[in-house]
Image (cartoon, coloured by chain):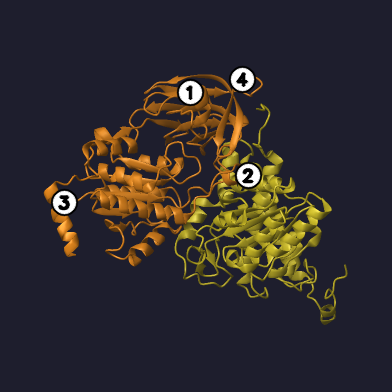
Amino acid sequence: MTDTLSTGVTRELDENALLDAYRTMRTIRAFEERLHDEFATGEIPGFVHLYAGEEASATGVCTHLDDRDSIASTHRGHGHCIAKGVDVKAMMAEIYGRRTGSCHGKGGSMHIADLSKGMLGANGIVGGGPPLICGAALAAKQQRTGGVGVAFFGDGASNQGTTLEALNLASVWNLPAIFVAENNGYAEATASTWSVAADNIADRAAGFGMPGVIVDGFDFFAVYEAAGEAIERAREGGGPTLIEVKFTRYFGHFEGDQQTYRASEVANARENLDCLKRFRSRVTETGQVEAAKLDAVDAQVADLVDAAVDEAKAAPKPTAADLETDVYVSY
Amino acid sequence: MGAVVGVVANPASGRDIRRLVAQASVFPTAEKANMVRRLLSAFAATGVERAVLSTDLGGISAAVLRTLRTRRPGKEAPWPDVEFCDDVTLTGTADDTTEAVRRMRAEGAGLIVCLGGDGTARVAAAACGDVPLLALSTGTNNAFPRMREATVAGLAGGLVATGAVPPETGTRTASLLEVTAGGRTEVALVDVCVSTSRHVASRALWDPATLTALFCTFAEPDGIGLSSIAGQLCPSPRESQDGVALTFAPPHRARWVVHAPIAPGLVLPVGVRAWRPLRVGEHVALPAGGGVVAVDGERELELTGDTPVSVRLRADGPRCVDVPAVLAESARRGLLRTELTPCQRWRRREEAETA
């Protein structure tokens, strides 16, 4: 028997890494809360689906990722974009439909993409992301980059054939893919406890021969730890993992949703479970980060979001001539 | 009033990170529901009249309800009257187990059965008071709940609930550990472990390098989880009130290196600096040093650098149903058998032929 084997991995984040994680979560929250207000003015075209309340998921996963890695997102994609490093001002401009946006103002909220950051796109098709990520993961495997693909999808998408096919393919091809099921309890207005026959989305992993785990989606450290294990396993050739994160979205399915299908869970989540509050109290109580430094991040993020909105509103809209650009892509 | 039993089944047990970092099993909801069904058949066979079942959003109670509505009387074994704790507001947390057990006690339950792992049993034990507890394993780490066939366990539980087997014969009072840190007190049925991890995070502990101290109510050589470390070094039987206390060291500096199954599929070398028996009533104060405290293998309490930790072993844990002892007593006293006189046999044969 060996005396040196140890599979345990201790991933202690230093102060700078903790501040980075907090900045990401705070930026997502501030971005979404501002959009909630701005959308009500009628200036923003199309729909927006806000990620507030779910920040620990995108941040806990993407903190482990680098330039080798790709993610695929959902209609609720702003948080994933920010966590993967997409420029916040370009995102805001895109949502306002301006030429300075990530996709030159032609995509809007549900189609923000930035391939230079490995962000394959928010996605208006429910269950559209997981098959894309199989492609990204296959490319990483074939080219031996050590990269991984991460698909974020919701409880509604977990019932889609595309998602189930992608889980199967990832397992059969032993792809470096991580499937993050973000279960916020409702697919639009349909409760996941009604629509997901397997009770827990993570339970489905066993049928595809991969590990499936459930983590507290309000806890950055829980997501960070589980994602770290899964991503390291994928990078080392161990294959795919399904991680189910459970939490509550703070706003409606889309802005304007009357939310008659749910009751008091949002107030409880905001008060008692909020990922930002919990992060702040934990890192200050353990002495890892001073509260003043977190306050400074809050102020910087508020300035950034203010500037993003101001610049987006002032930026030009696409013209008729722009209709004919960005239509075809050459490989 | 006839005998009442309560059954609480945790829909979340067997789902944590140990399926990723170890090879822990997935315990499907369908099988948890099957266990409840088997328990109900066994309860009816022992004369239990009413069963109060927990509700959940994981599909266990829904599956049992479906069976209740589709059963064919006369063709399937009888069940007691079944009621659900359907006025409990579910939270998806351990509070659901606590609240369900409270309702079952209020309904006069003479037995609480809990389906889950060590974590579920711990929560049920804290809420069940003097009512006998029967913990069955459907979780990840199962040092406290036993892996038992639910029909057999249900027969034993039913015999205790109906009073056919008296508690002094059929139950055993377990020890428990009480740990206090930063104004919070938690109990553990198996072990309390101090770790240098900073956060509760994904809750499980699986990295021996982070462990600093371990306290066990019992330590069995064939156990799983952290208590197996003591189980292979300094076993302490479940029947003994006393437990054990260990301190860890890196394997290259330790006096002993124990190869212990600290999680399913994870047999790792663990360095132990020292161990000693832990006596009932003994208080152990640990110096403040940060980290986390895990109870029954799950990180629960986060410590700041100036939070002292105190641990105490108590003898007044839950009264647990001793399944082999109950069924041995049943066999001795003939509780599950009938001997017919020649006259009775003749009468039964007549009845059968007439029918």
Q: Are marks 2 and 1 on the same chain?
A: no
Q: Report the mark closest to the observer, 3 or 1.
A: 3
Q: Which residue is mark 4?
A: B254
Q: Which residue is mark 1?
A: B245
- Near-viewer residue (A280 or A188): A188
Q: Position of residue A185 (x, y in %)?
A: 52, 62
Amino acid carrying label 4: it is Ala
Looking at the rendered structure, the secondary structure element under dot 2 is helix
Mark pair 1, 4: CA separation: 16 Å
Mark 3 burial class by Cα count in 10 Å: few <14, some 14-19, many 20+: few
Colour orange, chain: B
Three-letter amino acid code of the residue under disc 1: Ala
Local packing at callout 2 (Cα closer than 10 Å; few below 14, some 14-19, many 20+) is many
Which chain is home to disc 1?
A: B
Query: Which percent across, then down, holds residue B13?
Result: 48, 48
Left or right of A29? Residue B228 is left
**Left or right: where A38 falls relative to A143:** left
The shade of chain A is yellow
Residue A77 seen in render: no
Residue toward you, B270 or A68: B270
Residue A327 appears in view? yes
Give the residue at x 19% y 51%.
B2
Q: Chain of mark 2?
A: A
Mark number displayed over residue A225: 2
Spatial CA span between label 2 and label 1: 29 Å
| Label 4 crowd bin: few (<14), some (14–19), many (20+), radius 10 Å | some
- Spatial CA span between label 3 and label 1: 60 Å
Residue bearing the label numbered 3: B345
Residue B59 lies, with reference to residue A292, above or below; the image says below
